[in-house]
Amino acid sequence: MGQIDDLGDAVSLLITVAITVLFVWLWLGPTIYRPFKNRGLEKFRSFLAGLAARPEDYEYFTTGHIIWSQVSINEIEKIISNMAVRSGGETGPFPALPRFLLHVHEHKRRVYFVPTNAKVFDWDSIPHYEQYVRDRTDDG
């Protein structure tokens, strides 16, 4: 009888462990098994690769800076990475990826970067957006 009780305890423990592993896998699995990639910067790099003109010929606007052509693309990537809005928590073992929207105005040769979790941005507000950026970066 003692063996049956031990066997029952073992089966119960095995079922508990299996349920726990399944729960953890379903909860964290997609994050654990997907390599951590900054998709926003990958998009930005592919965008730069696709520009007809040299990327340095464009002005880059963000909410915190106006990035002129003298700034290297690597520096732009760092700024975007630091400014991008996180799509979830920023701390913990699996921080959320930054999200932002890009808009290119070919005629003006400008690139607009808006850190946001939104799926869309009112690009008709660009004149106000540019003024907002200039006001924030005005030295005096």
Image (tube, rainbow, N blue to C red):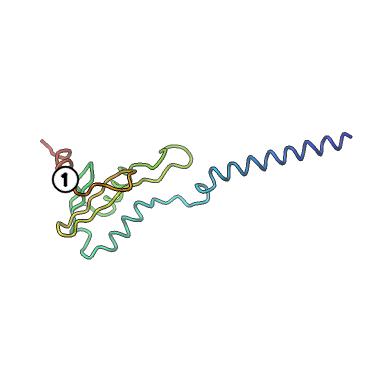
Q: Is residue 103 left or right of residue 97?
A: left
Judging by the rendered image, the residue that carries numbered circle 1 is 130
Q: Nearer the viewer, residue 101 or 70?
A: 101
Split into 4 quadrants, where in the image is the C terminus? top left
Q: Nearer the viewer, residue 72 or 51?
A: 51
Q: Is residue 109 left or right of residue 6?
A: left
Mark 1 neighbour density, 10 Å: few (under 14) some (14–19) many (20 or more):
some
Q: Residue at x 76, y 40 (%)?
A: 11
Q: Position of residue 122 (x, y in %)?
A: 23, 47
Which SS class for mark 1?
Answer: helix
Q: Position of residue 68 (x, y in %)?
A: 18, 51
Q: Position of residue 10 (x, y in %)?
A: 77, 39
Q: Is residue 13 left or right of residue 76?
A: right
User: Which quadrant holds residue 86?
Assistant: top left
Q: Is residue 139 left or right of residue 99?
A: left
Q: Nearer the viewer, residue 122 or 38?
A: 122
Q: Residue at x 45, y 50 (%)?
A: 36
**Residue furthest bottom in the image:** 52
Residue 136, placed above or below residue 72: above
Residue 75, placed above or below residue 88: below
Residue 94, placed above or below residue 52: above
Q: Residue at x 21, y 44 (%)?
A: 65
User: Which quadrant holds residue 82?
Assistant: top left
Q: Position of residue 77 (x, y in %)?
A: 30, 51
**Residue furthest right in the image:** 1
The three-letter code of the residue at mark 1 reads Glu
Q: Residue at x 89, y 34 (%)?
A: 1
The number of numbered badges drawn on the structure is: 1
User: Which quadrant holds residue 63?
Assistant: top left
